[in-house]
Amino acid sequence: MILLMILFTLHYLICLALFILMKLRRLHHSYVNLFIAVFIPIFGLIFMLAKKSSDIRSDRTAFDIDLEVKPDDDEKILNASSDLKFEDADDEEDSSKPEAAEDATRSSGGDTMMDVISDIKKSIVISDDSAAGNVVPLSEALAINDTKTKRALIIDLLYSNPTDFVQQLFYAKSNGDTEVVHYAATALTEIQKDFDLKLNDLLNKKALYPDDHKLDLDYMNLLEKYIASGLLSGERLKSNLRKFSDLIAGELMKDNVKGRWSLINKKANADLQLQDLKALYEDIDYMTKRWPEREGIYIYLLHWAILKKNRTLINDIISQIKKKVEYIPEELRDLMDFWDEKAC
């Protein structure tokens, strides 16, 4: 009985010591495992020891990474590099490497590259406790001169929700670190591919079920997110803006449409980006007939006059606004202040 009491006392003293070490960050282990160990004398500690031993074997640090890539994919993914390592020596590579990394990303198969990133992600050990006190904006984190931190951050971002960080990923593409550029470019390619696949899937469903209005709305909403993501540019952006504008036009022709004001604003914004004067004027006319009291109409009317490059028309519209509108929204006021000749 006395021996049993001694064993129990020793067990709880060890548990207390482990808890103190974990709080002091001298020992990295799950508090859940410690909780189990407390209530399962002796065997609980054995379980913790076995778990820690297993973690040490499976979780290598970033410095130990030496990934083997299949010969077929090697040239595509890593530009004829047979292994990928996180070493400080990478910082001294030639300045032409970021461009080479981007080219490799464009030509590589997305799934294979994400598999590589998945392996790297598993090999990077970041303490949650230590990271909690060091939260900084991604742009600032990428600006610091710490290769390991930058790479760990960008890979962690890839697995959080990269769609929410498109602009930050574009910023990361201009970073001086070759690997950071490579992963950011890969992530952007994957996000864009995901949008394209989802849109094609919805198009196929719409072809099968042409009368399903929900599919129309889903497609329109996804297209709106794609445009707003910042991934599109040039002719691809124009094409999708035109498609988005046409979809809204079709929706507005229906009876009992919910959120009609919101829809016509989205269409007007798309037509404004396209600099389509005729379509934008039709949007303004639509708004004026239905909501003549809305001040927001004047924003589009003034933009329309600016696109026409008609100074007299711009001045007339600004004069009308000053006479008719009691409360001028901030966006409209800023636009007026910029173009008002009398204010100059």
Image: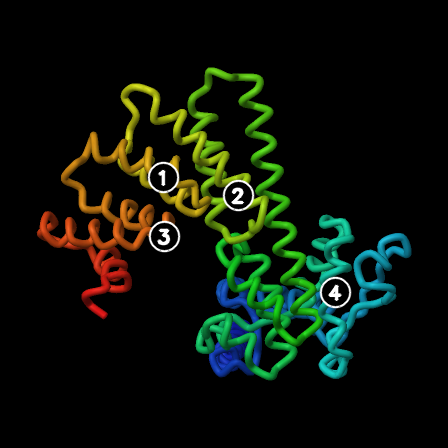
Q: Looking at the figure, which quarter contains the C terminus?
A: bottom left
- Judging by the rendered image, the residue that carries numbered circle 3 is 309
Using a 10 Å C-alpha cutoff, classify the residue at mark 3 as few (fewer than 14 neighbours), some (14 to 19) or many (20 or more). Answer: few
Residue type (three-letter) at the residue carrying disc 4: Ala
Residue 137, image x and y in percent?
A: 46, 72
- Residue 238's label in the rendered image is 2
Residue 239, image x and y in percent?
A: 55, 39
Above or below: residue 204 compared with residue 134: above
- Residue 195's label in the rendered image is none
The kind of secondary structure element at disc 2 is helix
Residue 219, image x and y in percent?
A: 49, 32
Question: Of label 2 and label 4, which has the lower sequence position?
Answer: 4
- Judging by the rendered image, the residue that carries numbered circle 1 is 280
Residue drawn at x 83%, y 63% is 79
> Residue 30 sits in which quadrant?
bottom right
Q: Is residue 45 visible?
A: yes
| C-alpha span from label 2 to label 3 | 22 Å
Residue type (three-letter) at the residue carrying disc 2: Lys
The kind of secondary structure element at disc 1 is helix
> Residue 142 sits in which quadrant?
bottom right
Q: Is residue 2 visible?
A: no
Q: Is residue 301 left or right of residue 100?
A: left
Using a 10 Å C-alpha cutoff, classify the residue at mark 4 as few (fewer than 14 neighbours), some (14 to 19) or many (20 or more). Answer: many
The kind of secondary structure element at disc 3 is loop
Above or below: residue 149 compared with residue 271: below
Residue type (three-letter) at the residue carrying disc 1: Leu
Using a 10 Å C-alpha cutoff, classify the residue at mark 1 as few (fewer than 14 neighbours), some (14 to 19) or many (20 or more). Answer: many
Kindly report which numbered mark, 4 or 1, lies closer to the viewer in this rendering.
1
| C-alpha span from label 3 to label 4 | 43 Å
Question: Of label 2 and label 1, which has the lower sequence position?
Answer: 2
| C-alpha span from label 4 to label 1 | 42 Å
